[in-house]
Image: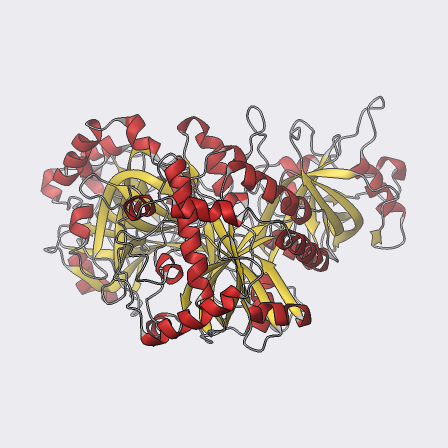
């Protein structure tokens, strides 16, 4: 069988169905290494389907009996162009789906027409699935081999538990390393990005070994720079790794490379620093074993002229020469490179290899750091956001994975805000959570804009960033003065007190947009600045799992309704929507059915009776201005304070006009406001988009260390392989919210009065210096985009939430018939759950 051979075979199968002898007993489903169910046990549905295919004159069949199977794995890979493809296609990623019928497991090929079910995270591990049509794809280069293809499915609910004890029907599917069913690739890719090493081809067993240097000729980097063009053979290099980049996957359908990977190492000796490029199969062999600080002996490498447009990271020592005219290339062949890790105990002082110098800064120093400054930070994690994805290029299938985190170091009331992209360290990226563990991130770049209000200031990872959460004692930075000061600060803290205010997950609207639309226009890099409201549905439908995108639309705010947050409200309001949103999806009609369900669900929710306006206003008026200010501030409301816009004459005129309009509304200003324009236009709309529901996973949660595994899993990406849950089933709704303000459902009517969209506004926290009588509260609250835990909600806090809601709704009523630009964050949470958040409003007073 091909699955047993040493090299992958091009064609449709490495390990699939096996039909070596057509004259064999057909009732037994012919196969090479096939297990059969015992005669006493129930019969395998997978085996019965294979018998149907064998007996069918067609290449596909509709199973005579459709029974649920469990999904155990969804694995992605790149499929090369077929020989008949004259024009190369863009990257076409395929998926192998492993299913179990309770008797056998089977790895199947998912028809590309069903890929959208994976893109939307509808087809995922752990669910029940019914397969209503299958086919067989034969390998014409090998005798009697083919694979089972899934052509039509109905995705169901998540199962509580699935047994992993069932064997594979075809033992070739269990072989190591795992190989895709189709094409010539020897490995799978990570499910949601291309930067992470995934699967069993990535080795970690390279160890330092002592080397006898008596017969080894070594050349310095500066000497090599001067002579490499005239050499045919190059002496060995003895260097230290200063930087290590994340992986780059450059596979394309028209390229026949088995393992198309690349990574950069910045290495140095006493004479200079140079870039080393590790290519292809060497990456799976060496990438995970190499780390910053190791000393390498490189032999049998090649040298070429450096790529002119690549920016090398700054050298750790400004005295070291930066060699940018050449690059060192390491490859498995042409010539086959020899890499040896030299033990640190064998490193001699006379080699004068450079030491690692870090650029640690404290949070109190960050305010004075210039834009694009490269730095390292150490701290404890106080907030870890959910994993999100952004598209690398439009109309492509490649994404970046990233998450927002907050790091505190005790030198400031403010944390470091870090945009943490995947650094090819999935074992860390997928397992970080708030804790008192030392968290180190290197090679971060400062992003700042002092002209924006509020000032923009955060850190983002670079190509050479590395993250460390363990093994600090073996790292050279442990002797850095700022690191020692931080460790001393941590030892003086009370773990319970520090952890009480930590947060995980939820919607995180960062970075904030500028205070004027003209500044926003100059800050975004998109082909079209404004999205027509008629195009919003397509923008939403095109989003893939965990993708978050920001768009700008024009319209008129016509309805705003306050939804108070309580655990009971969250659970109850979510239940109906979740029941509808999670309905099983067929491959042909998933989109149409779910859009219909969504419209019906939200129509019912919009007509629900709101809470008592009288009760709402009583809570608002019972607070003194001092208490209002204290509640709205909260203990952590100092991240990005901004000056408030002055009230213009135009705004005052709008306020006067809107007050008379509000007086004609059916309900008094309180929990809900509805404009006269909406009552006139709502029954004549040609389309009404309902995306105002806030799902459970979008509420940031107070972190509980004892439940770290469950909470971490909830806010990570969906895994490629099923892992049985530990202990009793848990629900995210049972964990306390880090917010107490509730949210708002806002209806924006298009300028042509034909289409409307319901969106959510989720206030995170409020400004430090709130002057309710002088500002437009709705616009003000939208200038603040950060997650911090609130104090334990008491009567004053709940009353303050209602007070704020009253202010916001009053502010919205002043925008009656005013043309606004709304900045929307659209988020796909997977499994047909989409949210649209109102991030910012630009009204005529702040559009210029």
Residue 120 percent across, percent down from the top left: 60, 53
From this viewpoint, which residue is outermost toward the top? 40
Q: Is residue 268 left or right of residue 299?
A: left
Confirm whether residue 847 shows in the render.
no
Q: Is residue 44 left or right of residue 445?
A: right
- Quadrant (top left, top right, bottom left, bottom right) of the C terminus: bottom left
* Residue 63, picture quadrant: top right
Residue 115 percent across, percent down from the top left: 65, 56
- Quadrant (top left, top right, bottom left, bottom right) of the N terminus: top right
Q: How is the image coloured?
A: secondary structure
- Identity of the residue drawn at 22% across and 55% down: 374
**Closer-to-camera residue (40/643):** 643
Residue 541 percent across, percent down from the top left: 60, 62
Residue 342 percent across, percent down from the top left: 25, 38
Confirm whether residue 277 shows in the render.
yes
- Identity of the residue drawn at 62% across and 71% down: 680
Number of numbered tags placed on the structure image: 0
**Closer-to-camera residue (520/3):** 520
């Amino acid at each position: 069988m091909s699955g047993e051979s040493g090299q992958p075979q091009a064609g449709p199968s490495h390990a699939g169905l096996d039909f070596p002898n057509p004259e064999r007993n057909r009732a037994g489903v012919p196969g090479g290494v096939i297990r059969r169910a015992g005669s006493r046990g129930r019969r395998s549905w997978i085996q019965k389907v294979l018998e149907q295919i064998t007996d069918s004159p067609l290449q596909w069949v509709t199973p005579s009996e459709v029974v649920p199977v469990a999904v155990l794995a969804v694995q992605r890979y790149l499929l090369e162009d077929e020989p008949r493809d004259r024009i190369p296609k863009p990257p076409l990623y395929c998926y192998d789906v492993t299913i179990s019928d309770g008797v056998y497991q089977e790895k199947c090929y998912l028809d590309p027409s069903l890929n959208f079910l994976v893109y939307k995270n509808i087809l995922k591990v752990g669910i029940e699935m019914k397969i209503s049509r299958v086919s067989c794809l034969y390998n014409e280069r090998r005798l009697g081999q083919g694979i089972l293809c899934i052509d039509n499915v109905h995705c169901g609910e998540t199962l509580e538990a699935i047994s992993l004890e069932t064997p594979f029907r075809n033992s070739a599917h269990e072989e190591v390393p795992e190989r895709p069913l189709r094409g010539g690739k020897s490995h799978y890719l990570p499910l949601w990005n291309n930067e992470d090493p995934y699967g069993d081809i990535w080795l970690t067993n390279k160890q330092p070994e002592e080397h006898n240097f008596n017969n080894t000729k070594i050349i310095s980097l500066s000497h090599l720079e001067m002579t490499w063009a005239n050499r045919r053979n190059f002496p060995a290099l003895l260097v230290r790794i200063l930087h290590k980049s994340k992986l780059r996957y450059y596979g394309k359908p028209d390229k026949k490379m088995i393992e198309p990977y690349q990574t950069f190492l910045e290495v140095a000796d006493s004479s200079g620093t140079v870039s080393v490029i590790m290519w292809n199969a060497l990456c799976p062999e060496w990438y995970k074993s190499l780390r910053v600080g190791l000393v390498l002996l490189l032999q049998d490498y090649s040298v070429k002229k450096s790529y002119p447009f690549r920016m090398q990271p700054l050298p750790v020592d400004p005295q070291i020469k930066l060699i940018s005219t050449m690059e060192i290339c390491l490859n498995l062949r042409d010539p086959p490179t020899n890499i040896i890790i030299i033990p640190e105990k064998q490193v001699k002082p006379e080699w004068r290899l450079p030491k690692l110098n870090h650029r640690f800064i404290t949070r109190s120093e960050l305010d004075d750091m210039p834009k694009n400054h490269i730095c390292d930070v150490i701290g404890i994690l106080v907030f870890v956001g959910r994993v999100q994805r952004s598209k690398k290029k439009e109309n492509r299938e490649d994404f970046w994975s990233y998450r927002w985190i907050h790091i505190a170091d005790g030198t400031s009331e403010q944390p470091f805000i870090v945009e943490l992209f995947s650094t090819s360290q999935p074992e860390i990226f997928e397992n970080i959570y708030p804790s008192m563990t030392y968290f180190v991130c290197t090679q971060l770049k400062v992003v700042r804009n002092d002209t924006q209000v509020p000032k923009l200031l955060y850190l983002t990872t670079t190509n050479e960033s590395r993250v460390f959460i363990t093994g600090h004692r073996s790292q050279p930075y442990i002797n850095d003065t700022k690191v020692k000061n931080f460790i001393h600060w941590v030892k003086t803290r009370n773990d319970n007190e520090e952890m009480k205010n930590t947060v995980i997950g939820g919607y995180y609207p960062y970075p904030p947009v500028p205070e004027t639309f003209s500044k926003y226009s100059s800050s975004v890099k998109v082909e079209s600045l404004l999205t027509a409201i008629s195009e919003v549905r397509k923008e939403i439908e095109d989003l893939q799992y965990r993708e978050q995108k920001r768009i700008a639309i024009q319209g008129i705010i016509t309805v705003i309704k306050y939804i108070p947050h309580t655990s009971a409200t969250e659970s109850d309001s979510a239940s109906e929507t979740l029941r509808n949103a999670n309905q099983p999806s067929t491959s042909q009609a998933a989109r149409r059915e779910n859009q219909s369900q969504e419209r019906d669900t939200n129509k019912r929710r919009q007509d629900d009776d709101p809470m008592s306006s009288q009760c709402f206003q009583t809570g608002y008026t019972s607070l003194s201005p001092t208490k209002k200010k204290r509640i709205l501030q909260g203990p952590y409301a100092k991240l990005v304070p901004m000056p408030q816009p002055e009230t213009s004459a135009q705004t005052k005129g709008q306020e006067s006009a809107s007050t008379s309009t509000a007086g004609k509304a059916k309900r008094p200003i309180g929990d809900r406001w509805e404009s006269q324009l909406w009552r006139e236009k709502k029954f004549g709309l040609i389309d009404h988009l309902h995306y105002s529901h806030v799902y459970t996973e979008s509420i940031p949660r107070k972190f509980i260390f004892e439940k770290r595994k469950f909470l971490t899993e909830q806010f990570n990406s969906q895994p490629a392989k099923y892992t049985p849950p530990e202990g009793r089933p848990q629900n995210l709704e049972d964990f306390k919210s880090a917010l107490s303000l509730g949210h708002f459902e806002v209806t924006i009517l298009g300028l042509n009065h034909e289409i409307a969209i319901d969106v959510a506004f989720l206030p995170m926290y409020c400004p430090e210096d709130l002057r309710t009588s002088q500002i437009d509260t709705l616009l003000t609250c939208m200038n603040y985009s950060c997650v911090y835990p609130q104090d334990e909600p008491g009567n004053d806090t709940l009353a303050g939430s209602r007070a704020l809601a009253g202010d916001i709704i009053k502010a919205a009523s002043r925008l009656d018939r005013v043309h606004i630009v709304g900045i929307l964050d659209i988020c796909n949470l997977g499994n047909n759950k989409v949210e649209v958040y109102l991030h910012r409003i630009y009204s005529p007073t702040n559009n210029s």
